[in-house]
């Protein structure tokens, strides 16, 4: 029994020491390699386009592609909604919480419209052990997004200031 307690104490001590170590579990060069996968360079937004990239793995190549496209579109939509919310955050309105909620709803409607027919600008695939990974990048012109957003915001948000919004969103 004493031997069992000593072994248990040694094992517990070893696990505590190993958990508190400051050594990286993944070498930096491998961590960097994971971050720079195919199509990643085409998934960076700029002044003209909103862009996003994603990857997905499945045993079916079509399903992997569909999943990756859905992830990329979702990421693109989130980026656009975040940009809109930041642009309208400083608006002086009496009920700010309701205003931001309405802006979010209208932004999501605009996202549904503009992302419906979007197609990938980069597609690459890899296969390992019968599992396919799809790498996808999508993009959409910022001005097209802002045109749809403006129309919906003006029609759905009372006293919406289009000029101030366009100025803030383009900053």
Image (cartoon, rainbow, N blue to C red):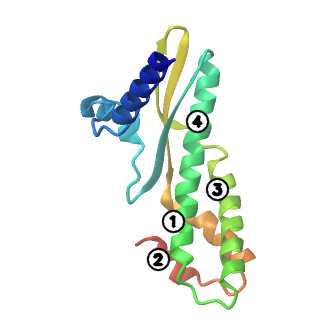
Asked which secondary structure carries label 3, the reply is helix
In the picture, the disc for residue 6 is none
Measuring 69% from the left and 69% from the top, which residue is drawn there? 152
Q: Is residue 98 left or right of residue 38?
A: right
Which residue is disc 1 drawn over? 83
How far, Cα to Cα, is label 2 from label 1? 10 Å
Of marks 4 and 1, which one's residue comes earlier in the chain? 4
Q: Which residue is mark 3?
A: 111
Q: Residues within 10 Å of mark 3 (few under 14, many from 20)?
A: many
Residue that lies at the very extreme toward the front in this rendered image: 2
Is residue 1 or residue 34 the one in the foreground?
Answer: 1
Labels 1 and 3: the sequence-earlier one: 1
Q: Residue at x 71, y 60 (%)?
A: 109
Label 2: state its secondary structure: helix
Numbered disc 1: secondary structure: helix
Give the distance between the C-alpha atoms of the residues marked 3 and 2, in whole angstroms. Answer: 19 Å
How many marks can you see?
4
Label 4 packing within 10 angstroms: few (<14), some (14-19), many (20+):
many
The residue labelled by disc 2 is 168
Q: Quadrant of the C terminus?
A: bottom left
Residue 69's mark?
Answer: 4
Q: Position of residue 89 (x, y in %)?
A: 55, 78
Q: Residue at x 47, y 12 (%)?
A: 128
As drawn, the residue found furthest toward the left would be: 29
Give the number of the mark in front: 2 or 1: 1
Residue at 27% over, 30% down: 27
> Where in the figure is residue 56, as x and y percent of width and height?
55, 29
Q: How far apart are the two marked residues, 4 and 3, measured between alpha carbons?
A: 15 Å
Judge left or right: residue 66 versus residue 7.
right
């Amino acid at each position: 029994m004493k031997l069992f307690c000593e072994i248990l104490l040694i094992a517990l001590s070893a696990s505590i020491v190993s958990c508190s170590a400051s050594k990286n579990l993944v070498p930096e060069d491998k961590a960097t390699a994971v971050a720079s996968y195919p199509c990643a360079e085409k998934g960076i937004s700029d002044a003209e386009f909103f862009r996003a990239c994603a990857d997905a793995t499945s045993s079916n190549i079509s399903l992997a592609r569909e999943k990756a496209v859905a992830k990329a579109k979702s990421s693109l939509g989130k980026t656009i909604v975040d940009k809109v919310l930041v642009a309208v955050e400083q608006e002086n309105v009496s009920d700010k919480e309701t205003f931001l909620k309405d802006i979010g709803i209208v932004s999501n409607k605009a996202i549904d419209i503009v992302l419906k027919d979007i197609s990938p600008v980069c597609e690459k695939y890899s296969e390992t052990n019968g599992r396919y990974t799809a790498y996808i990048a999508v993009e959409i012109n910022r001005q097209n997004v802002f045109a749809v957003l403006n129309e919906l915001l003006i029609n759905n948000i009372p006293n919406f200031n289009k000029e101030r919004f366009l100025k803030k969103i383009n900053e």
